[in-house]
Amino acid sequence: MSQTVIVAGTDGSSPRAHRDATWLVAVSAALWGLDGLLRKPLASDLAAGTIVLWEHIIPIVVLAPFLPAAIRAFARLGLRDKAAVVVIGIGSSAVATALFTRAFTIAGSSGDFITPLVLQKLQPVLAIALAVLLLGERLRPRFALYAVPALVGAWLLSFADPLHLSVSELEPALLALGAAALWAVGTVLGRLVSPSVTPRDLTTLRLGFGTVGAFGVVGVTGAPVLPAWGDAVGLVLLALIPGLLALTLYYRALRSTPASRATLGELAFPATAAVIGVLVLGTSLAWSQWLGLAIVAVTVTAMGVREARARHRGPATVDR
């Protein structure tokens, strides 16, 4: 259900034809939605810093054969792109994941695995704003037909009572919002450097710098470096499925998908996570959260239908 789109280069170069991969962004985001299923038992046993550290160590070991090539690719980048890659690794990977894990742990202690998804309410807003400021993307008015309902749905999905937030929701919400801001930065900076770095190298560099950042998180928080052997299988699954696999698919899709459109595809994350939370983790949804889930699903589906129709009409133009 992809279409050919015309994407102008960020450096002002002539447009290039690409196949839009918003659907692949949604697939990777759905894999992220499995995160809670694997993170819940780990969060009850391990400190957030320990989990985040091994979420980076395990995949970087898998990618070790590609590390020399990724380092050479990093050395060839300009100063701006090098800084972007470092921020993606340390900030958007290590620190953001630590913030989210802590928010998940706090909210989960009361049986609430939905509240941390508040990050999906603000992340698209921040990503769109940054895409306009940093990448020069100009959004068409009809984009609001998808963006506004999707954001409203994500907000309803995030809170049991969307108009009245309790004090107990404040700390995990603030932590989740911090993660949202850093992940939004990662979305835009990943799109910025994707023309210069292959998806494999960018994934390797993100996890490499993320490992450095994760050691920093462990040092600051005092979390143990080594987990218990009983948590080894869970850490491997968490690192490789919603971690390495999802990230690889995500960066492959991001090479041909504008950041503003990619961030809508990422709303598959809260939808999938909500379903997992209800069916597997025992979280109850209020009627407004079910409404939010329906809005997100309908919005993403409607966007996909429009993409399919646009494909039959011919190449579309994405203003950049």
Image (tube, rainbow, N blue to C red):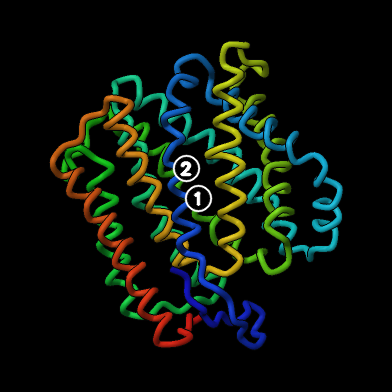
Q: Residue at x 23, y 56 (%)?
A: 295
State whether residue 320 is above or below residue 280: below
State whether residue 285 is above or below residue 3: above
Q: Nearer the viewer, residue 222 or 106?
A: 106
Tell me the residue that label 2 is attached to: 32
Identify the secondary structure beneath mark 2: helix
In the figure, residue 255 lies in which quadrant?
bottom right
Q: Is residue 30 left or right of residue 277?
A: right
In 3D space, how far apart are the residues under numbered discs 2 and 1 (Cα atoms)? 6 Å
Q: Position of residue 126 (x, y in %)?
A: 43, 59
Residue 208: mark in rendering: none
Tell me the residue that label 1 is attached to: 28
Amino acid tagged 2: Trp
Identify the secondary structure beneath mark 1: helix
Q: Position of residue 177 (x, y in %)?
A: 41, 44
Q: Position of residue 32 (x, y in %)?
A: 47, 42
Q: Is residue 297 left or right of residue 21?
A: left
Image quadrant holding the N terminus, namely bottom left
- CB-based contact (under 8 Å), mark 2 and mark 1: yes
Q: Position of residue 59 (x, y in %)?
A: 68, 36
Q: Is residue 213 left or right of residue 29?
A: right
Amino acid tagged 1: Ser
